[in-house]
Image: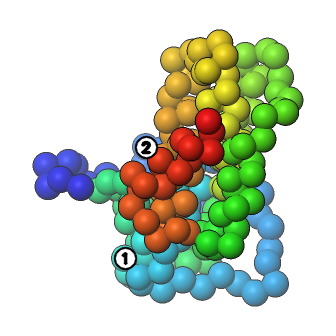
Amino acid sequence: MSGSEPDTRFLVSRSGLLPTAVSSTVPFQPSEAPLTFKPGDKVVYPHHGAAIVEKKEKRKAFGENTEYLVLRMTDGDMTLSVPVDKVEEVGMRWPISREDVEDLFEVLQKRDIREPANWSRRFKNHQEKLKSGDVYQVAEVVRNLALRDADKGLSAGEKSLYTKALKVLVSELAFALNTPEDKAEAKVQDALT
């Protein structure tokens, strides 16, 4: 992070990301116990990747006092504010464990894949997987687009999606392995070859 980059902030409200981001709807899947995060925790936010909880703060929003978690994304100066009572609904979660990394690499190494032949269906499918917040689906996007790039090349839209998916995947993998992102990315690239 350089000091000259702007600090971009988004507010996650009941209606989505405000003021300028496009909201992605993730179906709410209740867990046995509610997720609770505290400052210093490493978390994953769908479509953006790994983040660290900087602080909890109370704000007045929509006429109510609401407690928010302020997340600092690992890849820059962007922060997100998420209502504490909406963390599960927006898909925020803990990063995968070191033990789960092997399964992740198996997804990346799989070569027998099926995906729609139609570009728009394939692109939409990849976007949905990226928005899901599921690291294994994000790994599928990275793998599928890397294979397609090696075989036929990627369109500009697919290249952009690949870059985004790779960034999200690498940020979480770096947390899981407790390693710098460049080393995590090298491991991903090794698994893809």
- In the rendered view, does 154 fall on the left or right side of 134? left
Question: Which of the numbered marks, if any, corresponds to residue 20?
Answer: 2
In the rendered image, is residue 154 in sight?
yes
Is residue 115 depicted above or below 95 in this figure?
Answer: above
Q: Is residue 81 visible?
A: no
**Label number found at residue 147:** none
Residue 171: percent from the left, percent from the top? 48, 57
| Residue 162 falls left or right of residue 7 | right
Give the mark nearest the N terminus, 2 or 1. Answer: 2
As helix, strand or loop, the secondary structure at mark 2 comes to: loop
Residue 163 locus on image (x, y percent): 49, 35
Q: Quadrant of residue 35?
A: bottom right
* Residue drawn at x 51%, y 17% as measured from the top left: 156
Q: Which secondary structure lies at badge 1?
A: strand
Crowding near the residue tagged with mark 1, few <14, some 14–19, many ≥20 C-alpha atoms within 10 Å: some
Residue type beneath disc 2: Thr
Up-down: is 86 above or below 142?
A: below
Would residue 171 appear left or right of 26 to someone viewing this image?
A: left
Tell me where residue 154 appears, x and y as whole percent. Answer: 58, 18
Q: Nearer the viewer, residue 69 or 118?
A: 118
The image quarter containing residue 115 is top right
In the foreground, 62 or 106? 106
Indicate which label's residue lies in the foreground, 2 or 1: 1
Q: Which residue is mark 1?
A: 54
- The part of the image, by quadrant, that contains residue 16 is bottom right
At 72% across and 43% down in the image, what residue appears?
Answer: 109
Mark 1 residue type:
Glu
Residue at the (62%, 36%) spot, across then down = 193
